[in-house]
Image: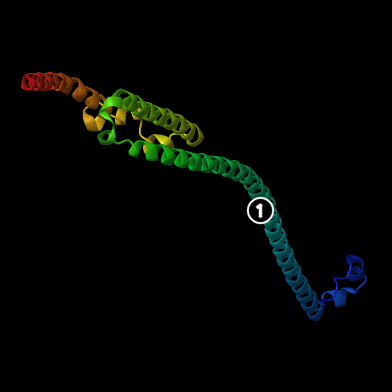
């Protein structure tokens, strides 16, 4: 450790010859230089400690800010995900119910076979078939509306509108409408044929 600087009073106590001697002056200069070097090292050490403390404070602030930010984001995200999970589960249940209902009504629709109908019960069979189609259309629209309400606009792309799509393949008319037209057109021919056959049998019996 460098020698401490002697107070001015001690220097004044030296004799004039001793104070002005070259050896004494060189010694004082050397001591002053050593003290300046020591002070410079101490200053550098203090500045280094200051930088370290500032960096430590900055990192602590960064930690507190990041911790608060991520805690807030994760908390809000958990709430959103919980709500989305509930909505997804509810929509999944609605989709399952719709699939089951659509499957049942599709079986009923595909079971309609006009060729197997008894001509004498044509009106009854036709009314029953139309009722089946109307019921399927009603259920379809109800399920479609529920899916749209639960899933926003997703249902618009996946489930077509009955009003716009159901009749496009037949030029705006349903199968049963064309069937009714066909019956109306052929009914006079059937009646005329029956009359002709009855007349032929009556003439042949004479």
Q: Quadrant of residue 46?
A: bottom right
Whether residue 149 sits left or right of residue 28 in the image: it is: left
| Numbered label tally | 1
Q: Quadrant of residue 84?
A: top right
Where, by quadrant of the figure, is residue 7 drawn?
bottom right
Identify the residue at image location x=76%, y=76%: 30
Label 1 element class: helix
183 vs 17, left or right, is left
Residue found at x 76% / y 71%: 38
In the picture as drawn, the residue positioned furthest to the bottom comes out as 23
The chosen color scheme is rainbow
Is residue 13 among the parts visible in the rendering? yes
Q: Is residue 114 left or right of residue 27?
A: left
Asked if residue 172 shows in the view, the reply is no
Q: Residue at x 59, y 45 (%)?
A: 81
- The residue to which callout 1 is attached is 62
- Which residue is at the far front? 206
Q: Is residue 78 left or right of residue 117?
A: right
x and y, in percent, of residue 130 in the image: 34, 26
Tell me the residue at 20%/20% (across/down): 184
Q: Position of residue 74 (x, y in %)?
A: 63, 48
198 is higher (above) or lower (below) than 100: above
Q: Position of residue 22 (x, y in %)?
A: 78, 79
* Along the viewing direction, whichever of 152 and 183 lies nearer the viewer: 183
Locate the N terminus and report the quarter of the image it occupies: bottom right
Q: Nearer the viewer, residue 19 or 173?
A: 173
């Amino acid at each position: 450790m460098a020698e401490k600087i002697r107070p001015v009073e001690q220097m004044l106590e030296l004799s004039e010859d001793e104070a002005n001697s070259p050896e004494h002056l060189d010694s004082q200069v050397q001591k002053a230089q050593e003290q300046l070097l020591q002070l410079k090292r101490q200053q550098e050490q203090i500045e280094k400690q200051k930088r370290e403390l500032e960096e430590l404070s900055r990192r602590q602030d960064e930690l507190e800010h990041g911790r608060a930010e991520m805690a807030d984001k994760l908390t809000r995200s958990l709430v959103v995900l919980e709500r989305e999970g509930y909505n997804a589960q509810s929509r999944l249940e609605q989709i399952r119910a719709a699939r089951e209902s659509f499957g049942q009504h599709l079986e009923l629709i595909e079971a309609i076979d006009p060729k197997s109908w008894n001509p004498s019960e044509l009106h009854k069979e036709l009314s029953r078939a139309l009722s089946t189609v109307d019921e399927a259309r009603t259920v379809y629209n109800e399920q479609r509306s529920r899916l749209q309400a639960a899933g926003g606009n997703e249902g618009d792309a996946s489930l077509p509108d009955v009003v716009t799509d159901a009749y496009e393949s037949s030029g705006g008319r349903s199968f049963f409408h064309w069937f009714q037209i066909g019956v109306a057109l052929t009914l006079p021919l059937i009646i005329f044929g029956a009359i002709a056959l009855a007349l032929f049998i009556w003439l042949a019996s004479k």
